[in-house]
Structure formats: structure tokens, C-alpha cells
Image (cartoon, grey):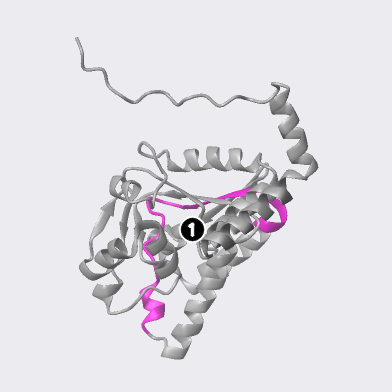
Amino acid sequence: MTQRTVSYALEGAMALIGLDRAAKRNALSDALIEELRLAVERAAGEARAGVIFGHGGHFSAGLDLAEHVARSPVEGLHHSRHWHAVFDRIERGPVPYVAALAGAVIGGGMELAAAAHVRVAEPSAFFALPEGQRGIFVGGGGSVRIARLVSVARMADMMLTGRVLSAEEAERCNFVQYLTGPGEALAKAKDLAARIAENPPLSNYAITNALPRMQDLSHDDALFMESLMAAFTQTTPDAGERLRAFLDKRAERLVAPPSTDKDDTA
């Protein structure tokens, strides 16, 4: 019997997708990528938000090199394109995803995390792109997604020199959006996904699908698309009710976050 490499659970409107090759630091094998595809497709039909995490102490140590080394160039091309299709379904499908990151987030694991819409990391998380030292190149969309998040210069540095980023460094360079305490990334990711699931699906879809595409457009074209999205989303019954609730003071009001400034005065 083939051992499953991805777990799936539904908690309310939230899909929990877990990479489950802990003994291999959740290395991304062909079987795991296929199971991930099936899990993402299942979530598209029954969830309003999702969390991707790694079982054990690591998110993912990246591409399973034992499988990769035997591929011909043509096989490598098709393998890369398959990863693109799966990760695109995460990034540009109907379900917003939060990635909970711990331990190794390396190579293909970093590419997978980049396909999520929000990333949460605990102190054990570390980030690397060692493809240059392996004599290969990224193939899971990292040259597009990671470079846009952290800049081409920083990604080139990581690939050329083997530089490893800590969780704090990844947050400073915009790859990570939230830092947590030890062992808290999954709980925080679930909390964020639960909040996201409460948003109207059309608004979530516009944020995850229209907003990234606007970055590829000219200034005028992006503003035109923004106007279309604004007009389209505000006409839904859900939006109308939420706006009325705000005007009637029935909706929760936003408040300033707690101050993190330390008072050093006596």
C-alpha cells in the first residue's frame, strides 16, 4: 500500500493541508505533489480558506533530489511545468491560503510557501535557495514569486552564495508577514485563515487573483481593473449587508493595535 504524503482535514470552512513526510523533512516528491494537487482541488470545492503546514519539525526541505537526479532535460521541463500548475492553483484558485512555517523552508519548500497568500513563521524557521550550490535552478515558480516578494537582488544573493535567512530576516525582507513564538505558527495560521473565511468569497477572490495581476499591468490599465473590481464587488448582496451593518454601527470597529514601544523613563 502506498503511504500517504499529504494529510487533509476540514475544520468548518477551513481546509488544513499537511505535508506528511516528516522522516524526509517533507521533501517534495512526485507523489507528494500529486497528493497536494488533489487536496487543493478538494479544498476548492468545500473550503473558503486554507492552511498549508508541515508535519514534524519542518515545513519542507524542498525538491526530492533522489528523484530529480535521474530526469532527462525533457522530463525536467515537464516536471517543472507540473509544479507550476499545482502552485498556480494554490496562488490563483478560489481559496486563499496561509502557510505555517517552521524548521526548513528550503528550495521547493520556499517556492511552495511563496504560492500562499500569507506566511506565518516561528523562530525555528529558516529559508534558503541552495540551487546554485547544487548546479541546478529553481523550477517551482520561485523566479517569479520569491523574486517579487524579496527582490531579485536578494534572491540572487541567496542562490549564488547559499545565504540562509532566519525567520526575522525573512519577515524584514517581506517573505514572512507574521512572526510567532515557538510552536505557535500553525495556531496563528489557523486563526488568520478563520478570519479570511469570514470575508465574502468574491472579495477574497478579487484580492488573491486581481491584485497580483494588477502588478503586471501598466499604471492606467491597473487602475481601470481596480475600478472594475470595486464596482463588481460592491454590487453583491453580501457587500450591501456588510456596508449597512457598518453604517448602522452593528459591525465591529477597527482599533489601533497595542503599542510595542517600550517606555524607558523612570
Q: Quadrant of the C terminus?
A: top left
Which residue is at the far front? 220
**Disc 1 marks which amino acid?**
Asp
- Mark yes or no: residue 109 visible: no
Q: Position of 104 compared to 113: left or right?
A: left
Most foreground residue, 17 or 136: 136
Q: Residue at x 59, y 64 (%)?
A: 89
Most foreground residue, 201 or 15: 201
Q: Which residue is mark 1?
A: 20
- Numbered marks: total: 1
* 67 drawn magenta: yes
Q: Quadrant of the N terminus?
A: bottom right
Which residue is at the far top? 266
Q: Residue at x 30, y 72 (%)?
A: 131
The image shows residue 247 at horizontal and vertical percentages of 71, 25
Label 1: state its secondary structure. loop
Q: Position of 162 compared to 190: left or right?
A: left
Most foreground residue, 77 or 214: 214
Most foreground residue, 114 or 243: 243
Extent of the magenta region: 43-69
Q: Residue at x 63, y 58 (%)?
A: 225
